[in-house]
Image (cartoon, coloured by chain):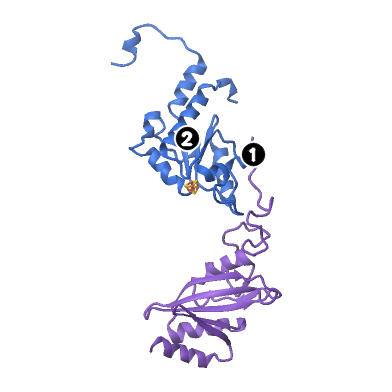
Amino acid sequence: MTFEQAMDAFRTAFSGSILREETHRGELTFYFKKTDVPAVCRYLRDQTGFNFITDCLGTDRFTDEERYEVIYHLRNLTQAWFLRLVTRVDESDLTCPTVSDIWPAANWMEREVFDMYGVTFTGHPDLRRMYMPQDFEYYPLRKEFPLIGIEGSIPLPSGGH
Amino acid sequence: MGVESAFGEGYITTTVDALANWARKNAVWPMPMGLSCCGIELMAFAGPRYDVARFGSEVFRFSPRQADLLLVAGTCTYKMSKVVRKIWDQMPDPKWCIAMGACASTGGMFRSYPVTQGIDEFIPVDVYVPGCPPRPDAVINALMQIQEKIGQHSVLMDR
Ligand code: SF4
């Protein structure tokens, strides 16, 4: 099976879910509905051999509608294929289904997206913050968050003298 | 032939301060805190080419209980600040601290939310070393300034 054949089969299987696709510098990207994340990812792993998730990340588009994006970078290690998946998350419903049960490597990546953007992954086994302290109240990679941080939001240790 | 042959059967007089400072000055045992890239230059400072053993500081202690100089080399994040502070609190008095590099001194190029803007926000610093990273000779110079500072110390200050 070539990459094109595999992608054609994918397009037919999920024609109702795929919103858009684009190719940039030979890399194919699919935009699809958030609710279909588990089905799409499971199909790609089991039927198309995308056995490795290299990255799962977020972006803040700072728009009124569908403000956040969750992006998946997939690889088929036997065929050396690359595929990018994008799904959009609206501010009114900051949730996204987890893929950590499909690729366990996504566990920490989703924690990072949660830490930086506040998107909660439903079904994630251990959704704690990744880098920032547990009691930190903000999501630092959101566009409205100031680069230097918010004074006093992370307490510094004080003197024992 | 020990030192006693030079003095014969006599004795020497000195002050407690002079004796204690002489001993402390020439055995400053650093607690290395290599937090990022400056840590590499810190290793060069300890290695054979720059050879800090010439100044009596070759014994890098990985237990704060046995160290009297905290050498913070690198970018200190807010999360790490609690660790650095804890290690500083565990070191016995008298103790000194060097902030090595732009990051430890001021936050350096990381003017951003996870990085403390200088370790002096939570521990006292005796000597700041500029540079990104500072050359090992600059760190040796900082050590010599610490030695000078120890020379002005009085045991009555130790409480
Ligand atoms: S001062 Fe420069 S070399 Fe040192 S830790 Fe910061 S960035 Fe790295």
Q: In this view, does B13 lie above or below B121?
A: above
Residue B122 visible here: no
Amino acid type at image mark 2:
Gln
Residue in front for this viewpoint, A88 or B83: A88
Residue at figure coordinates x 36%, y 36% from the top left: B50
Residue at figure coordinates x 56%, y 65% from the top left: A112
Q: Give how far across and how far down residue A57 sits, in percent.
A: 55, 70
Residue in front for this viewpoint, A118 or B105: B105
Q: Is residue B112 above or below residue B21?
A: below
Amino acid type at image mark 1:
Gly
Q: Are marks 1 and 2 on the same chain?
A: no
User: Marks 1 and 2: CB-CB under 8 Å?
Assistant: no
Q: Which chain is blue?
A: B
Residue in front for this viewpoint, B85 or B49: B49
Residue where numbered disc 1 is placed: A159
Residue where numbered disc 2 is placed: B66
Residue at figure coordinates x 49%, y 86% from the top left: A43
Where is the N terminus of chain B found, in terms of image quarters? Answer: top left
Colour in which chain A is drawn: purple
- Tell me if mark 1 has few (under 14), some (14-19) or many (20+) residues whose alpha carbon lies within 10 angstroms of its own: few
Q: In this view, does A153 lie to the left or right of B9?
A: right
Q: In this view, does A76 lie to the left or right of A64?
A: left
Mark 2 belongs to chain: B
Q: Is residue B22 above or below residue A159?
A: above
